[in-house]
Amino acid sequence: MVRNQAKSSDTIGGLARAAGVGVETVRYYQRRGLLPEPPRPPGEVRRYGESDMRRLRFIRSAQAAGFTLNEIKELIDLDASDDRARARELAEARVAAIDEKIGELTEARDALAALATACAKKRGGACPILTAFDEQ
């Protein structure tokens, strides 16, 4: 029984390694209320299971999508209450923020591409790329 339990559970270090994060990251998520801290049996270490790994992966994926830790906490809480309307609202807000960032990046890319073209065409004098950044 103990061997089977050991295979389906892990220490905080094992959980962190498996998720590709540091132990302090796991502890930070626990302090923030994003990841539960399992009970500690007397004389033993805390053991983390598959549900903890799924939660940790969810947190990392949500961060990669641009959600803040506060928003992730709200999404986790919403999952318990099945408030899909609020979850959808949070997702739509992220999409809008990403669209805005895409617009900013596209504008920056276009400006830099125009400077690179101007630099290629200019023969002599200061490079338009360098002078453009001097003017900022």
Image (cartoon, rainbow, N blue to C red):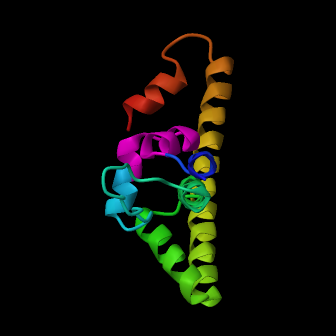
Up the image or down, 106 lies above or below 40; here it is above
Number of callouts in the render? 0
| Quarter holding residue 123 | top right
Q: Nearer the viewer, residue 124 or 8?
A: 8
Up the image or down, 65 lies above or below 108; here it is below
For the stretch drawn in magenta, what is the main secondary structure?
Answer: helix
- Is residue 20 shown in magenta? yes
Up the image or down, 2 lies above or below 38; here it is above
Residue 19 point in image, percent of width and height: 56, 44
Residue 82 point in image, percent of width and height: 61, 88
Q: Which residues are magenta?
A: 11-26
The residue shown at (38%, 29%) is 134
User: Extreme top residue here?
Assistant: 124
Residue 56 point in image, percent of width and height: 54, 56
| Quarter holding residue 51 | bottom right
The residue shown at (57%, 74%) is 93
